[in-house]
Amino acid sequence: MSTVFLSYCRSDQADAARLAAALAAAGLDVWWDHLIEGGAAFAKRIESALEGADAVVVLWSARSIESDWVLDEAARGRDLRKLVPASLDGTPSPLGFRQYQTVDLVRWREGNDEAPLQALVRAVAAMGSGAKPEPVRAVSAGHAPLAPHGPGPANAVRRRLLLGALAAVPALGGGFYAWRHFAGGSAVAIDNSVAVLPFDNLSGDAAQAYFSDGLSEEVRSTLTRNLALRVMAKSSSSRFATDQRDATEIANELRVSYLLRGTVQRQDDTVRVTVSLVEGQTGFDSWSETFTKELTDVFAVQTEIAYAVADRLSAFVDGDREDREGLAAVGGTTDPTALDAYLRGRTLYDLSSDEASERAALRAFDDALAADANFAAAHAARARSLTAIANQYGSPDENVRLYAEAVTAAERAIALAPALAEAHSTLGFTRFQGQLDARGAREPFEESRRLGAGEATVLTRFAQYAARCGRHDEARDALEPALVRDPLNPLIHRAAGGIAYAGKHFADAIPPLEKALAMNPKLTRAHAAIGDARLNLGDIDGAIAAYANEPVADMRFAGLAVAYRRAGRAGEADAAMGELHALGDRVLYQQVQALAEARAIDVAFDALERAHALRDSGLIYARNDPFLDPLRGDARFKALLERLGFDLPVA
């Protein structure tokens, strides 16, 4: 793998970031530093990186030719015979460097012309000793992906590409999503990647496991706010809670460089937490520390651990105070009773095994708030709990109240802790799916993406919302880092299939759905989603086979009603429609899909009106559901979309 040292001036940082992403996507190992002009304290580190690189790419511009730092680095690259000059704005190389051919990046910078970028990649490849990189396509500004790469020399300070949500995804080609890179085995861990495994309970009481599990999750949540780290999400990390494999095997499967392990011992009002950072390649501890605190200081413990991990992974080159303060725990409490109830609720909520556990979780969050009414994280958790109950178990009448309470709880959490991404995400989800207000959901969803760029669940919710609103590029860009951070979560792969489907990339929707089912063969709604994609691809028999395997009755019968009708099997279509009607008004949206296929237009619109009155959450799919195309040209349909808050042009 060829290594590249990227030299640029601070005023060109945005272009440098975009270029670094494109080079990384080509398979090059990019070394750069957004603090490259930060002073003499960095000189030795910069020199070490420059000396070890195969090529020194210098970005000339009207400003960089006046930068002493850039001129010095260019001179060293020239002396080492590995200078690759490029011009961002057409500015010629300064005196002393004009004997070198310069790659003109103006057309690439102003648009997405790949030719200059390809020329630069070829020039770098000619310098390096590694294999020739793969062709690269242009990367849109502001959405730069990062290619995975392996560890470098032990004596070099790695200056990794740390952009936005730090998505370790190659540039996409040949499909809407690069599913192959998530199929297992092909990606290599990057240096600042870490998985927080569930902490072990050393209390001697198995009933106290909720406390150790909850604390490890709070540490993980705090770490995700550091965008310089790639933190594996809970659903993927927690698969190894009782796994007896050694650290190297676990790290390899999760594709992370480090594992954070811990033990928790609680005694009376004191908690003792021991954590260790394990190197994924060797299995050895690179750092460990013990924290002993009063229960009132537990939220401070998670912040201390997060600082220590970030420092160990060199996430803060100069210990920048502003960044460190952003890593503090958000929305916590100093009340031990509130904390205990909250952690109990988290464990029950994560189980989500049945309605009883969901409602028990809600009671636990209520207990936490009874002890501390200003516990923002508990308000946010209460909002999630109310939304889950409404989504899965509530009656139409009860749901109106539950969703209204969820909105109030999320808004209270935001008022208490404006930086709590999960609260903004829950508010957006509840307004969108619970109150059918796409317009009102937009601001909290966008704020959740900004604040929660390291949180897979937050990113996935935003991606699904964006896809339903026709913002397909934003949906894809949010989902990619979510898949990287939670590659073993079947729900995210199922969401990926739904997002591709919403963009009418029907063939690309099937692989992630099949991957989700491989992870969890009992997963609901995945077989039906495959059936939808196959039906829209013209594979009626394949669609019918997929629908027949769907465990959720409303989706199974809706799919079969449409597929049989399209196959000309009217009797079977009517029978499936009869099954839908027998399920009652709770499946009105699915009835509309079948009625639209049967061209019962007026009856379909009557059902749509009832669905809207009952706040049927299926209506969030209406904007780009191809099964509703027979209704799409009708003024009544356009009026419905406006009432739902879909203010973007209909796809």
Image: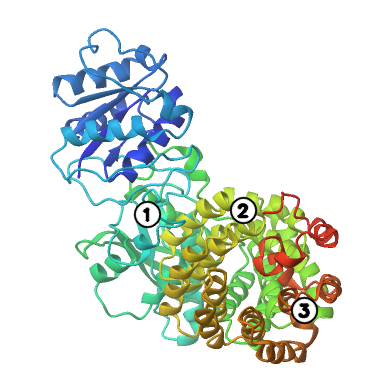
In this rendering, would 537 be left or right of 333? left
The amino acid type of the residue labelled 2 equals Ser
Which quadrant: the N terminus? top left
- State the SS at label 2: helix
Distance, label 2 to label 1, CA atoms, is 24 Å
Distance, label 3 to label 2, CA atoms, is 31 Å
Pair 2/1: label in front: 2
Of residues 463 and 176, which is closer to you in this image?
176
User: Which quadrant would residue 264 be assigned to in this image?
Assistant: bottom left
Could you tell me which residue is drawn at 37 percent across and 40 percent down?
A: 22
**In the image, is residue 346 above or below residue 100?**
below
Query: What number is the disc on residue 309?
Result: 1
Of residues 56 and 266, which is closer to you in this image?
56
Residue position for label 3:
588
Could you tell me which residue is drawn at 37 percent across and 12 percent down?
A: 66
- State the SS at label 3: helix
Q: Please provide percent x and percent y for residue 431.
A: 74, 62
Query: Badge 1, how many Cα within 10 Å: few under 14, some, many 20+?
Result: many
Q: Is residue 426 visible?
A: yes
Upstream in sequence: badge 1 or badge 3: 1
